[in-house]
Amino acid sequence: MLRRNNGKTAKAMGPEGFFRGPVRTCTICGCKASKELLCRFVWQGQRPVMDVRKRMMGRGAYCCDRERCVDGFLAREKKWKIAFRL
């Protein structure tokens, strides 16, 4: 389950009430979730590439697996500069 960040310090909630392991934030909608539940992108060449295995080298940026968030991330170059510190 994903929990939206509404400006307060929000915990990512799971079936047991919390996630074990790293928690990441979607760069588009701001929801927090376990690292395994989010899509990871890595900067390669001139554009971000989806890191399916989540093992590629380099700074990663995360977003929800929802189509709206993935498309929004790929379309917004300004978000790339912030997420990948370009």
Image: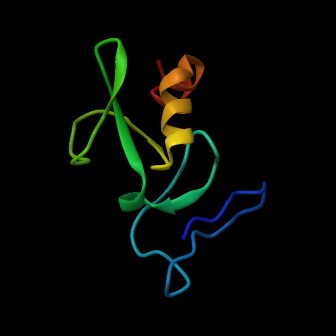
Q: Furthest-right residue in view?
A: 7
Specify the quadrant of the image occupied by residue 59.
Answer: top left
How does the figure colour the protein chain or chains? Answer: rainbow
- On-image quarter of the N terminus: bottom right
**Left or right position of 5 against 76:** right
Q: Furthest-front residue in view?
A: 67
What residue appears at the point 64 percent right and 48 percent down from the top-left corner?
30
Q: Furthest-bottom residue in view?
A: 16
What residue appears at the point 57 percent right and 75 percent down from the top-left corner?
13
Residue 45 percent coordinates (x, y): 28, 14
What residue appears at the point 50 percent right and 42 percent down from the top-left corner?
67
Q: Furthest-top residue in view?
A: 46
Residue 63 percent coordinates (x, y): 49, 44
Residue 36 percent coordinates (x, y): 36, 60
Q: Is residue 58 above or below residue 67?
A: above
Residue 64 percent coordinates (x, y): 50, 49
Q: Is residue 15 above or below residue 19?
A: below
Q: Is residue 7 above or below residue 2?
A: above
Q: Is residue 5 above or below residue 59?
A: below
What residue appears at the point 77 percent right and 57 percent down from the top-left corner?
6
